[in-house]
Image (spheres, rainbow, N blue to C red):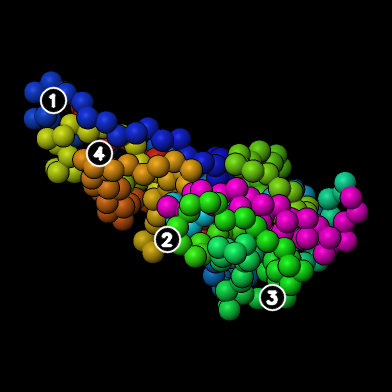
Amino acid sequence: MTAPHPPRRTPLRRVLPPVAALALPAAVGAQAAATTGGFGDLGPPAAACAARIPAESMVRVTVYLQATVVDPADRPLLPAADLLAQLASERVRALLGATPGTLPRGDSAVAWTALADPLRVTVHRDGRFTLPASADRAALLPRAIADLAAGGERVFWPDGHPGDSAAVELRLHRPVVDPGGAAEPLRLRVELPLFSLPVPRSSPVVQTRPPRIAYPESSLRGGAVGTVILEFVVDSTGRVDPATVREVWAPERPRLTGEVGRFYDAFVRSAVRGLAAARYEPTRVGGCAVRRLVRQEFSYGFR
């Protein structure tokens, strides 16, 4: 069970397998799903169950803030996104009354059930950043961004980068606490501590029936092998929510293009289709079955 981190990537490549191998079924292997810190919308039954988790069973952990760019083409903006996250983290700590060098408690301002909701901010070419109209400006993180914008703070736009604006997501991350009470370390690209918060213990998502994933016929002649990584929500019944499936690609890495890129896209489509047949034991938080965001790696090759 791991926290979100920039994915390892095995680039697709063309190989020349033995002729006999092409006549055999192509093989795909799916690694165990890695549970992340995000729970998503708990839904009424799970929320009601979560509300009854005893406070004394929870474990206090540090919550961190990390920024990502939404469009991989905007990866040159990552340093600006990181600067925005740093400014926001400082403002959040100030709003919670922290003194320099101390970590405030977020108990009065943030519920652990709300940590999965990212905040999307628009960064503009002139360095301004704006919140979406739908943002709850009374909530802690949107309030911090609004305060920074009102105070005239700016981030930089890289020279030569096209466009007039770009979307940046700010997401809160916290360690997963196992049933024994141990907090697993996060592996974040940038760690910006915000506050501490008591969170319940949880069990990981466990795959009980593998996805039905076939090697794409369009890639057989090319003899491509490689790995794709998908993120998706496993609901409280152990099924994949198809609306949440997305490919994971580190924004600082260039996209694959040409023939190799076509092979990769075919592998992604194959993995997405195959997830419909997969089944999982859902994560349990304080004994409550809940939705959980997971990350799973699928490797394509030949038998």
Crowding near the residue tagged with mark 4, few <14, some 14–19, many ≥20 C-alpha atoms within 10 Å: some
Inspect the image, locate mark 1, and give the three-letter code of the amino acid beneath it.
Ala
Whether residue 176 appears in magenta in the rendering, the answer is no
Question: What's the distance in space between the residues labelled 2 and 3, CA to CA?
Answer: 26 Å
Contact (Cβ within 8 Å) of mark 1 with mark 2: no
Between residue 234 and residue 248, name the one nearer to us: 248
The residue indicated by pointer 3 is: 137
Kind of element beneath mark 1? helix
Spatial distance from mark 1 to mark 3, Cα to Cα?
59 Å
N-terminal of the pair, mark 1 or mark 3, is 1
Could you give the CA–CA distance between mark 4 and mark 1, rounded to whole angstroms?
Answer: 20 Å
Q: Marks 1 and 3: CB-CB under 8 Å? A: no
Q: Earlier in the sequence, mark 2 or mark 3?
A: 3
Residue linked to disc 4: 260
- From which residue to which does the magenta span run? 73-100
Q: Secondary structure at mark 2?
A: helix
Where residue 219 sits: x, y (%)?
Answer: 17, 39
| Mark nearer the N terminus (4 vs 1) | 1
Can you identify the residue that label 2 sits on? 244
Identify which residue is drawn at 71% across, 48% down. 192
Which residue is rendered at x = 39% and y = 50% of the image? Answer: 247
Of the two numbered discs 2 and 4 on the same chain, state the one appearing first in sequence.
Answer: 2
Mark pair 2, 4: CA separation: 26 Å
Q: Nearer the viewer, mark 2 or mark 3?
A: 3
The mark nearer the N terminus, 1 or 2, is 1
Residue 166: x and y in percent read: 51, 62
Tell me if label 2 and label 4 are in contact, CB under 8 Å: no
User: What's the distance in space between the residues labelled 3 and 4, CA to CA?
Assistant: 44 Å
Could you tell me the amino acid type at mark 2?
Thr
Relative to 95, does residue 234 appear above or below in the rendering? above
Per the model, the C-alpha gap separating discs 1 and 2 is: 35 Å
Left or right: 89 in relation to 74: right
